[in-house]
Every structure is written in structure tokens, then in C-alpha cells.
């Protein structure tokens, strides 16, 4: 059985790929039938899978150890190579969209492939290759800067994830000092973050104009494959969140303030949820994997086989360590048929949230990664987050495996944090719309805009005497703003769908699993709104659906005596 450590990396030979790609593309163009075009398409997809495998393998190993010079150089190479490779894919998309056998190909491969191809064509031209290469370099600089953070605290040198347990300490003074220590890194590097972001905003704005867009915002929507909704629909959704969810989130924060017994809830109190202490997993990452193997084995035969595949091949990296990039993610290595889960466990409840969340992504691509169309391996990001967030809820019955007597604490706090996250996610989205509508804004104006938006969506947040945060610096730690602009609203849209799976799984678990499993197998073969409909869910763009879902959660939360947890 081949282990992840044995997966061979080979730098893509772009010149050879270009020649081979050109031959297959000519075969596609000159084909005399849909069958001949389908054969050429399969050959092209094989090349694309090879490039993606190498690129993702380099990325995984670079983020696992950003101090590894070899994989740092390979990541630099991929940052340059990806736009060049995209320049090969673009003519293929043009040929695909213009195929005389389009109707037959759509019948075999689905309409979504053509919708994504036509959308992608709007996002690229050879003129912007150098801009895309620079964009990738700037994003990698941000990743490395955050990964370099080492904080002196409690007589130890800690990474930012390792600081996490102190942020949840029952001792308020420890929480305050730990929070201040973490933000000291960001405030000390504030100008560097400002400089990187300013370069990215101006670069993306210029790139959008070269491609014929009035601003970067519609280009970003096209990059994300949003073929079935637009900025106006998203703005209406955010307005619904302000009206229906922000007041409830503030009431839940007031319950927390009362529950933990403080006069005012400061930002450094928000991570401390119960006076008896937060729920914590009862073991180290290796033990968590063993518990997860049992959980997924009992959930269904499909998930049992999936997680055994992951664990036996070493496709999980969960330990935090110096030089490891921050955050968590799941990616896919198509030539090996292997998802990969990456996290930074720190002994808090977040370890289980990220494990189940990323396992939701991994299970989805494990199911759909073998589809012959690479565009269908993943859905668009909005739909992809349904799988991850729903998996957090579907696994609720097994939380005793990880938390023992504190399982109810976890379930309550996870549901609350899922709901209170939505206003924050909308704040990040509105901020980015403001940013790219004002690309010439100064660093100070950007921070002021963030603080104004933050106050509307998070009226409960109190920064006490932290001058950096009070000026509007919090957004600098939100990596998505730098590396995947406009992604963040996807989490909030998906959360409304995941809440529906939570309710259905609570009432009819077999039906919920059947619907969830079907959704995973569809991969990205349909756009977001059609996937939602196919799964039997209500659209998050429907205000009545939002009100109904939130009302059901409020009833459940109101029935919980959280002071007894």
C-alpha cells in the first residue's frame, strides 16, 4: 500500500506538456464525431490531472514545512507555472464551447462543464499571465509571513495555533495576555500586511480591467464559477442576515456573558464558553484519528472505507509545529485518487470541528474525484462547503468518542458558533465588495471601513484597550481575504444549507444520509442552486428559508440550559 510519504513528486515539464497538449487539442478540433472529441478530451484531462497532482503535492509539502527550501522553490515554480498552464487550457475551453458536437457532448458530460468553460474564458487571456504569476507570489508571501509567527508566552515560544488553548483558559487574565500576544505579531507586521494587500488590490484591479471588467468584483465571481447568482442576490442575502441573524447572535453573546460571569464580554472572552471550562478532546491527534475511524465505520460502510483509506495511507497531517503554515484545508491528488486533510491541532474543540469539516470535503472528493471531468471533482466553493459543514452536524451522535462527558458542551457550542459565524462571514464579504469598489483607498481608510462594517454585523464585539484591533486591524489575520477573494460568503450560504441537514439528521438520519451521500457523488456536475435543489434543501437566497431555519435553531437553543453545561 503506497503511503503519502512515498508519493513521488516530479516538477511538471511545461514545454513537454505544451507540445502534448497541442497535439491533443488539434485532435479535438479536427475530430469528425462526438466520440472522437470525447476521446481527445480524455487525453487532455489526463494531462491536466498530472499537472494538478504535482502542483497540489508541492503545495501540501510546502505548507507542511515552509522552511523546507526544496518545496519552497517548487511552490515558487508552481506559482509561475499555473498561469502558464492555464494558457493551455484556455484554447481548449474555446474549442469546447464552439464544438459542432456540443449537444452530444453535453448529453454525455453535462451542461455544467460548458457553463464553467464559458465562465472561465472570461477570466483569462495571455495578456495577464505575468499578473497572475505575481498574484500567486504575493499570496505565497502572505502565507509564509503568517507561518513565520512565533509568539513568546508563558515562558515558551509558540506558533499561533499553539496559543489557542490559552485563549480558552478559565483565567481571564491569561486569556487577555494570550490574545494580546497573538495580535502583537500582527500589529508588529501591520505595515507589511498593508503593503502586501495594497499590491494585491491594485494588481487585481488592473488585471480585471485588462480582461474588460469594470472592477475586480465581477471577475472574482467568474473565477469562483458563480454561474447562477450575482452580487445583487448576495447583497440581499447579507441584508437578510442583518435583519434575522445579527440580533439573535447578539442575544447568544449576551447569554455567554451571563454564563461565564463577566460584566462586559471583551474580544478575549469570546473563546471562553463555560465557567467549568470549554469542551476539549480527550487525546492527541493520533488518538483522534483512531476515534474517527470508529465513528466513520459506524456512520456508514462508505465512510468507513473512506476513512480507512485516509488513515492507512497517511493522508492526514494534524500536528501543529514551527514552520507549518497556519489553518486547515483539504485538497486532492487526482493521479493517486487521494484526498489530503491538513490541520493544526492544539488540544481544543476546534480540533474536532476542523477534522470533521475537512473530512466532509475529503469524503465528497473521494466520492466524485473519479468522475472523468476534472471540473466535477469539486463543486464550486459555495456548494463544497455544504459537505464540510454538514459533516460537522451529521457526526454529532459520535461526539462522546472524542469528548466523553463534555459531548453536550461541544454540540451546543458548535451549533452556537456556526450560527454566530454567519454575521462575521457576511462582514468579510461586504468588506471585500467595499475594497474593490475603492481600490485606491489608503491603508487607514481600509481599516476604518472594516471597523464600520464590523460594528454593524458584530455589534457585541468589544476590543477593550487593544488599539490595533480598535483601529480596524482584525481582517489582516483572515487569510481568505488575501488568497481567495470573495470566497468567504460561500461559508455562510453553505451554513444555511448545513443547518437543514442538521435538522433532517436529527429527525430522520437515514434520509439525511441518503441525501448527503447523493450530493457528494454529484460533485461539481451542477451549479450551486441546482445542487441545493437536488439535495432537497431550501435556497439560502430565499428569505423565508432563512427565517424558518434560524427559527428552528433558536427554538432548540432556547431549550438548552446552557448554565448547567
Image (tube, grey):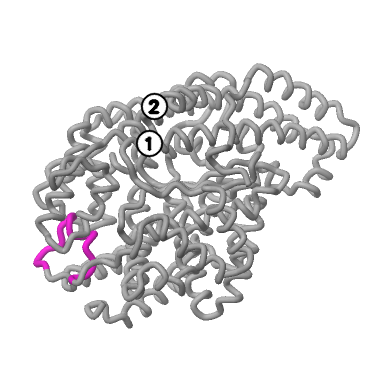
At mark 1, the secondary structure is helix
- Queried whether the magenta region covers residue 500, the answer comes back as no
- State the image coordinates of residue 436 (x, y, percent, origin top left): 38, 35
What residue is at 62 percent from the left and 32 percent from the top?
A: 121
Q: Please state which of residues 502 and 410 is positioned toward the viewer in this rendering.
A: 410
Q: Is residue 265 left or right of residue 147?
A: left
Q: Earlier in the sequence, mark 1 or mark 2?
A: 2
What residue is at 12 percent from the left and 50 percent from the top?
A: 177
- State the image coordinates of residue 478 (x, y, percent, origin top left): 33, 43
What residue is at 42 percent from the left and 76 percent from the top?
A: 552
Q: Quadrant of residue 188?
A: top left
Q: Please state which of residues 443 and 306 is positioned toward the viewer in this rendering.
A: 306
Picture layout, residue 277 above or below residue 73: below
- Asked if labels 2 and 1 touch by Cβ distance under 8 angstroms, the answer is yes
Can you identify the residue that label 1 sits on? 482
- State the image coordinates of residue 379 (x, y, percent, origin top left): 59, 50
Can you identify the residue that label 2 sits on? 138
Amino acid at each position: 500500500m503506497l503511503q503519502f510519504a512515498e508519493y513521488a513528486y516530479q516538477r511538471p515539464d511545461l514545454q513537454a506538456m505544451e507540445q502534448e497538449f497541442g497535439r491533443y487539442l488539434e485532435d479535438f478540433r479536427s475530430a469528425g464525431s462526438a466520440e472522437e472529441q470525447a476521446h481527445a478530451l480524455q487525453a487532455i484531462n489526463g494531462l491536466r490531472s498530472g499537472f494538478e497532482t504535482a502542483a497540489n503535492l508541492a503545495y501540501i509539502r510546502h505548507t507542511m514545512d515552509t522552511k523546507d527550501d526544496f518545496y519552497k522553490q517548487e511552490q515558487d515554480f508552481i506559482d509561475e507555472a499555473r498561469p502558464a498552464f492555464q494558457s493551455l487550457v484556455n484554447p481548449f475551453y474555446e474549442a469546447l464551447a464552439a464544438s459542432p458536437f456540443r449537444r452530444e457532448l453535453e448529453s454525455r458530460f453535462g451542461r455544467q462543464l460548458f457553463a464553467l468553460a464559458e465562465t472561465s474564458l472570461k477570466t483569462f487571456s495571455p495578456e495577464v499571465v505575468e499578473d497572475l504569476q505575481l498574484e500567486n507570489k504575493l499570496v505565497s508571501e502572505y502565507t509564509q509571513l503568517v507561518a513565520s509567527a512565533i509568539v513568546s508566552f508563558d515562558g515558551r515560544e509558540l506558533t499561533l495555533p499553539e496559543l489557542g488553548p490559552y485563549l480558552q483558559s478559565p483565567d481571564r487574565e491569561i486569556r487577555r495576555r494570550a490574545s494580546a500576544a497573538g495580535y502583537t505579531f500582527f500589529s508588529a507586521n501591520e505595515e507589511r500586511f498593508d503593503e502586501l494587500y495594497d499590491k494585491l488590490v491594485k494588481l487585481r484591479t488592473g488585471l480585471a480591467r485588462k480582461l474588460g471588467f469594470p472592477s475586480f468584483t465581477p471577475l472574482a465571481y467568474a473565477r469562483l464559477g458563480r454561474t447562477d447568482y450575482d452580487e445583487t442576490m448576495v447583497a440581499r442575502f447579507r441584508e437578510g442576515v442583518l435583519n434575522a441573524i445579527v440580533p439573535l447572535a447578539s442575544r447568544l453573546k449576551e447569554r455567554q456573558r451571563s454564563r461565564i460571569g463577566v460584566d462586559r464580554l471583551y474580544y478575549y472572552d469570546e473563546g471562553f464558553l463555560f465557567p467549568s471550562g470549554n469542551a476539549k478532546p480527550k487525546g492527541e491527534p493520533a488518538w483522534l484519528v483512531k476515534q474517527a475511524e470508529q465513528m466513520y465505520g459506524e456512520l456508514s460502510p462508505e465512510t468507513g472505507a473512506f476513512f480507512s483509506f485516509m488513515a492507512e495511507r497517511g493522508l492526514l497531517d494534524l500536528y501543529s509545529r514551527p514552520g507549518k503554515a497556519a489553518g486547515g484545508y483539504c485538497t486532492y491528488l487526482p493521479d493517486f485518487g487521494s484526498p489530503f486533510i491538513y490541520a493544526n491541532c492544539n488540544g481544543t474543540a476546534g480540533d474536532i470541528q476542523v477534522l470533521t469539516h475537512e473530512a466532509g470535503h475529503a469524503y465528497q472528493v473521494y466520492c466524485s474525484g473519479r468522475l472523468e471531468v476534472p471540473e466535477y471533482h469539486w463543486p464550486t466553493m459555495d456548494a463544497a462547503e455544504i459537505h464540510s459543514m454538514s459533516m460537522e452536524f451529521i457526526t454529532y451522535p459520535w461526539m462522546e468518542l472524542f469528548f466523553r462527558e463534555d459531548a453536550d458542551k461541544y454540540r451546543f457550542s458548535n451549533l452556537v458558533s456556526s450560527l454566530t459565524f454567519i454575521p462575521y462571514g457576511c462582514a468579510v464579504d461586504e468588506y471585500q465588495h467595499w475594497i474593490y469598489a475603492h481600490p485606491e483607498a489608503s491603508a487607514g481608510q481600509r481599516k476604518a471601513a472594516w471597523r464600520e462594517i464590523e460594528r454593524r454585523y458584530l455589534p457585541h464585539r468589544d476590543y477593550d484597550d487593544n488599539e490595533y484591533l480598535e483601529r480596524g486591524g482584525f481582517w489582516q489575520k483572515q487569510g481568505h481575504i488575501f488568497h481567495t477573494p470573495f470566497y468567504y460568503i460561500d461559508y455562510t450560504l453553505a451554513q444555511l444549507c448545513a443547518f437543514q441537514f442538521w435538522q433532517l439528521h436529527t429527525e430522520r438520519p437515514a434520509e439525511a444520509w441518503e441525501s448527503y451521500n447523493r450530493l457528494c457523488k454529484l460533485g461539481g456536475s451542477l451549479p450551486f442552486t441546482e445542487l441545493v435543489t437536488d439535495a432537497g434543501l431550501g435556497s439560502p437566497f430565499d428569505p423565508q428559508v432563512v427565517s424558518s431555519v434560524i427559527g428552528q435553531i433558536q427554538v432548540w437553543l432556547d431549550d438548552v440550559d446552557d448554565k448547567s453545561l
